[in-house]
Amino acid sequence: MTKAIQVQKLQKSYKQLQVLNDVNFEVENGSIFALLGSNGAGKTTIVKILTTLLKQDGGTATVNGFDIASKPEKVRQSISLTGQFAAVDEILTGRENIIMIAKLRHLSNPRQIADDLLKRFGLTDAADRRVSTYSGGMHRRLDIAMSLVGTPQLIFLDEPTTGLDPEARLEVWKIIKELADSGTTVLLTTQYLEEAEQLADQIAILHEGKIIANGTLAELKQQFPPAKLEYIEKQPTLEEIFLAIIGKKEDH
Amino acid sequence: METAKKHFFSDMGVMLERSMRHIFRSMDTIITVTIMPIGFMLLFVYVFGGAIQTGTDNYVNYLLPGILLIAIASGISYTAYRLFMDMQRGIFERFHSMPIARSTVLWGHVLSSLVSNAISVVVIIAVALIMGFRSPAGILSWLAVAGILALFTLALSWVAVIAGLSAKTVDGAGAFSYPIIFLPFISSAFVPTESMPSGVRAFAENQPVTSIVEAIRALLSGQPVGNDIWIALAWCIGIMVVAYFFAMRAYKKRV
C-alpha cells in the first residue's frame, strides 16, 4: 500500500447545489496534505465523505486501501476525525473523555492510555477538571489527543486552528508536525494560506467544488508567475509583536 | 460490520456510562423533573382534593399513578434535550467516524432515561408515603407496576429520540413533551371519567393514560386488574415499536 488516500471523480450535491464536482487527489503515506479553500469551497464535505459520515453521489475513494463505500467499517478502524467543532464532551473531565474513546476502540488499558496522552499534551494538571472549564487551546489539544487514541494510521483535521489564539495555533502546528514525524498521515483543511505553507508536504486548492491546483509548495510556486524582486521594508506583523510582548518566542 | 456487532453491549455500556455522568452532574434536571409532579400532588391533595369525589377515602392513593406518569412525561424531555445537544456538538461526528455500533449512541440516551426516571419515581413515591399514601400491594404487584412504568418510560424515550433528532432548536426538542404531560389531566388520573361531558369522556376512556393509570391503581390497591393491564401493555409496546421505527428512520436520515 503506497497511498493513504485515493480520490477519483468524487461528486456530491445537496439537492440542487453541486458541492463537489469531479474531485481527484492522492495523499502519500506519512505526509501532511492540506486542503486549502475558502468557506463553502467543499472542504468539510470531502472530509465527511472520506470519514464515512456522508455518502458520495459519484466517484470512488479509498482510505488506507479500503473502499469507503463497500468497507466503511475497515475505514473507521484505521482513521480518526477531529471535526471542525471540538469533538469533546464538555461535561466529562479530560481524563474521562480519553478513557471513553479508548473503551470505544476496545483497547486493553484505557487508564494508561489516558495518562500517557494527557502528559504528552500538557493536560495532566487539568485532567480531572470538566472540559467546560478548559480554554480554546486546551479544548483543541484534548480533541487531538482523543483522535490519537489507538494510534490510527491516518488523521483528519478539519480546520484545526480556526478560532484559536496565536499561541494555541502554534501549539497545534507543533503537534501536527510531530504527528507526521512519527509516521502518521495527516489530512488537514484550512482557510489560512500560512498554515498550509507552514505544515503541508502537499497542498491542494479547492475552489467551487473543484481542485484547481495540486502540488508541493515549490511546484505551486512554479506554476504561477515567477517571483519578482522587490525591496520592501520588513515591518513586524501584529502577530510577531503580540507574541514578543507576551514573551513567547515564535519557534516554528 | 462484524466488529461493530460483536461489541454492541460493551459500546452501549460506555454510552450509558457517559449519559449517566451527564445526568448525575446536572442534578438540577432530576430535581426539576421531581418537583413539578410533587407540586401537583400537593396542590391536588391539599387544595382541590377536598372538592373532588373519587369514591375513595384516600385521595393520595387515587392520585399517585397519574402523578408518576406526569413525572415520566416531563423527565423524557431532558432525553430529547441531551440528544439534541449531542448532535449540535462535534462529539456525535466523532462517534460516527469510529468503528462502533452506531445505534448504541441512541441506546445510551434511552437507557439512562430509564435510570433517571426510576430515580424520580422513587423520590415521588417517598413523598407520597409522607403524605399518607398506603398500599397493601405485595412484591409481585410492585414488580408489575415497575414493569409498566419502565415500558411507559421506554416508549416515551423513543418518542423523545424522534423529537431530539428532528428538532431545529433546543426549545423545539423539549416542547413535544407538553402535550404528553397534559394527557393525564384528560384521563381518570385525577377525577373519575364519569364526571366528564360525553365527548371528553370518550377521549379520556380510550387514550393510553387511562388504562395505564387504572392498571397501576388496581395493582397498588390490591384490586383485580382485569383487562386494563393488557390494554396498558398493548399501548406501551405499540407506542414503543412505532416510535423506535421512526426514531431509527430519523437517525438514518441524519447520519
Image (tube, coloured by chain):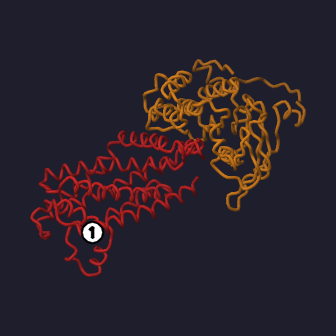
Chain colours: A orange, B red
The answer to which of A57 and B101 lies nearer the viewer is B101
Crowdedness near tag 1: few (<14), some (14–19) or many (≥20) residues, C-alpha within 10 Å: some
Furthest residue in direction bottom, as rendered: B198
Furthest residue in direction right, as rendered: A226
Indicate left or right for A128 with A206 as reference: left
The mark total stands at 1
Furthest residue in direction left, as rendered: B57
Q: Is disc 1 placed on a helix, strand or loop?
A: helix
For the point 70% across and 39% down, the residue is A191
Which quadrant of the figure has residue A182? Answer: top right
Indicate left or right for A209 with B235 as reference: right
For the point 29% across and 47% down, the residue is B119
Question: Where is residue B124 shown, x and y percent of the image?
Answer: 23, 51
Indicate left or right for B240 with B93 as reference: left
Question: Where is residue A145 shown, x and y percent of the image?
Answer: 57, 30
Which quadrant of the figure has residue A183? Answer: top right
The answer to which of A192 and A83 lies nearer the viewer is A83
Question: Where is residue A11 shown, x and y percent of the image?
Answer: 75, 53
For the point 21% across and 63% down, the residue is B217
For the point 50% across and 45% down, the residue is B8
Q: Which kind of residue does numbered mark 1 sit on?
A: Asp
Q: Pick the quarter of the image with the N terminus of chain A.
A: top right
From the viewer's perspective, is residue B221 above or below residue A140? Answer: below
Indicate left or right for B128 with A93 as reference: left
Identify the subunit bearing mark 1: B
The answer to which of B93 and B17 lies nearer the viewer is B17
Question: Where is residue A87 shown, x and y percent of the image?
Answer: 55, 39
Residue under pointer 1: B228
Q: Pick the quarter of the image with the C terminus of chain A.
A: top right
